Image (cartoon, helix red, strand yellow):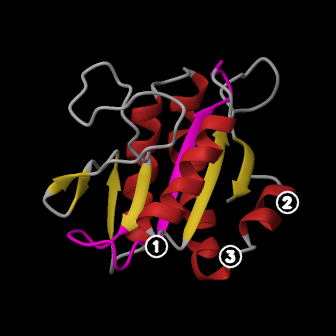
């Protein structure tokens, strides 16, 4: 991870040291997944494992779709959503650090995108803003994972706090 990205990550000290540690570990141990342009879910699963080790007093979940006992619904106004859809149109966070069963202690939500994606980052920014506003996450982070090995080594290519 380059120095500029680490500087941006340090903006929120309560969580930044943990996020930096897990992203470093992911790059060191799982670079191969970026080199072969693995599915985003494969990448976020591995990063979620490293986050769990950093946030041992919280629950870390990937694509979590519950809000208590009810399906987690988030309306961002960019498309019709249905919590029971099977066409991958529903909005689920890539990784969350929270306490299951309530929205009283939602610490961190992270949206990931591969640099090879053709979808705009704007949708992720809207989602992250809505997670903070509607589901009361204290921190929201966008991370782009570089998968174009022809351009550079696979690594973290962009981070933004929302």
Disc on res. 107:
1
Is the magenta region chiefly helix, strand or loop? Answer: loop
- Residue in the image at 41% along x and 39% along y: 91
- Residue in the image at 41% along x and 74% along y: 55
Give above or below for 69 relative to 107: above
- Report whether 80 appears left or right of 69: right
User: Disc 2 versus disc 3: distance between alpha carbons?
Assistant: 16 Å
Q: Are marks 3 and 1 in contact (CB under 8 Å)?
A: no
**Residues in magenta?**
98-118
Give above or below for 48 relative to 157: below
Tell me where residue 25 appears, x and y as whole percent. Answer: 55, 56
Give above or below for 99 relative to 162: below
Tell me where residue 132 appears, x and y as whole percent. Answer: 53, 64
Mark sitting earlier along the chain (3/1): 3
Tell me where residue 151 appears, x and y as whole percent. Answer: 82, 22
User: Disc 3 versus disc 1: distance between alpha carbons?
Assistant: 12 Å
- Residue in the image at 39% along x and 68% along y: 53
Assign a secondary structure to mark 2: helix
- Residue 75 placement: quadrant: top left
Query: 75 or 31: nearer the eye?
Result: 75
Mark sitting earlier along the chain (2/1): 2
Query: 140 or 50: nearer the eye?
Result: 140
Question: Residue under circle 2?
Answer: 3
Image quarter of the C terminus: bottom right
Question: Residue under circle 3?
Answer: 12
């Amino acid at each position: 991870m380059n120095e500029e990205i680490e500087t941006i990550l340090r903006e929120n000290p309560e969580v930044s040291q943990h996020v930096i540690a897990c992203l470093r570990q992911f790059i060191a141990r799982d670079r191969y997944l970026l080199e072969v342009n693995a599915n985003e879910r494969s990448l976020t699963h591995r990063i979620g494992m490293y986050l769990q080790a950093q946030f041992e007093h919280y629950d870390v979940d990937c694509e979590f779709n519950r809000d208590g006992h009810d399906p987690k619904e988030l309306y961002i106004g960019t498309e019709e959503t249905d919590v029971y859809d099977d066409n991958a149109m529903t909005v689920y966070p890539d990784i969350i650090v929270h306490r299951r069963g309530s929205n009283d202690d939602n610490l961190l939500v992270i949206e990931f995108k591969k640099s090879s994606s053709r979808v705009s980052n704007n949708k992720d920014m809207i989602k992250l803003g809505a997670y903070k506003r509607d589901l009361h996450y204290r921190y929201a982070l966008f991370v782009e994972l570089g998968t174009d090995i022809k351009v550079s080594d696979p690594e973290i290519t962009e981070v933004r706090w929302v």
